[in-house]
Image (cartoon, rainbow, N blue to C red):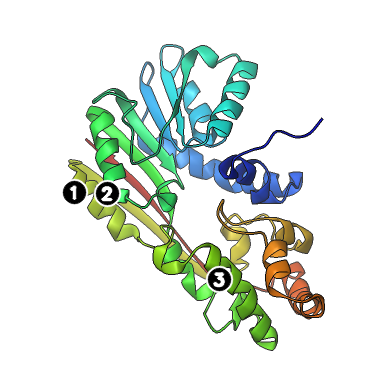
Amino acid sequence: MAEPVRDRWAAWLLERRHGGDPEDLKATMEFLTPVRDRVLKNAALTGGETLLDIGAGGGLIAFGALELVGEEGRVIFSDISQDLLDHSRSLAREMGVLDRCEFVRASADDLSALEDASVDAVTTRSVLIYVKDKRRAFEEFHRVLKPGGRLSIFEPINRFNSPNHPSDGSIFMGYDAEPIQDLARSVWAVYERRQPPDEDPMLDFDERHLFDCAEEAGFEEIYLYYEARRAPNAAVAAGWGWAHRWEILLKSSSNPRAPTLEEAMAEALTQEEAERFTAHLRPLVERNENTARHAVAYLRALR
């Protein structure tokens, strides 16, 4: 029987993010678990409350919150992907917690399906990075929260990472690509055609912009925690489970809009060029000889 067709968000989260490899998925989840725990800690949930998890994806934060809100509490899974909502609903049914879960298809900048002052806490993880109108999203977060409600978010700050991919092709994904600079430039051009930097919501903000959006939306108290690093082995530190594994890097994609490296190479390079590109880059990947920049922000705010 043919596999069901998934939208790009579900296809990426359930397969393309980790190249369909269980070990890579495990490494990714090991990185994300403490992120989840910190987001939930900042949300300060107590028994009987209602949490709205926006961009719930596979339910990492939402399922983690169920124990915190208890039997009398409720968790609303919100996502733009119906496939992911259906996936989470199936998991909730298997776990026996379906009666405490609600599923709403909505985008972060349009929560009109939810009433004003209807939830105690709002969480997001790597969601605003895909949203063009971030100010509108913060206004919606503020609107649906009850007075005294809490907002807790985590976002990668990709603008900080841009030196990992200089336009001259001398560095590719944090690896020295100078001997294949021409090829690296051609491959990276595929990524930029898919996601033009001047139009990409993943690159149009930094941590200060998040703070300003929260302030302008009317939050009374705002706390922002920014972490940045430049270090060897940064792929591991950033939660990129494909570190050391060329075959997984080939088949994985950094976000739902991006091609896999294999797809980008096929589009940009001849067979001979692809062999030269691989001959140089593969040993560097397998020895993890990269130095890269990585930054994230945690923000919590009180309505």
Tag 2, which secondary structure?
helix
State how far apart marks 1 and 3 are (Cα).
33 Å
Closest to the observer, 69 or 207: 207
Q: Is residue 236 left or right of residue 302?
A: right
Asked if marks 2 and 1 touch (Cβ < 8 Å), the reply is yes
Q: Which residue is mark 1?
A: 216
Q: Is residue 24 left or right of residue 134?
A: right
Q: Is residue 217 left or right of residue 287?
A: left
Quadrant of the frame with the N terminus: top right
Res 291 quadrant in image: bottom right
Query: Residue drawn at (67%, 66%), measured in percent from left and top?
Result: 264
**How many numbered callouts?**
3
Residue 292 tag number: 3
Residue 135 tag number: 2
The amino acid pointed to by label 2 is Arg
Q: Earlier in the sequence, mark 2 or mark 1?
A: 2
Q: Is residue 111 left or right of residue 59?
A: left
The amino acid pointed to by label 1 is Glu
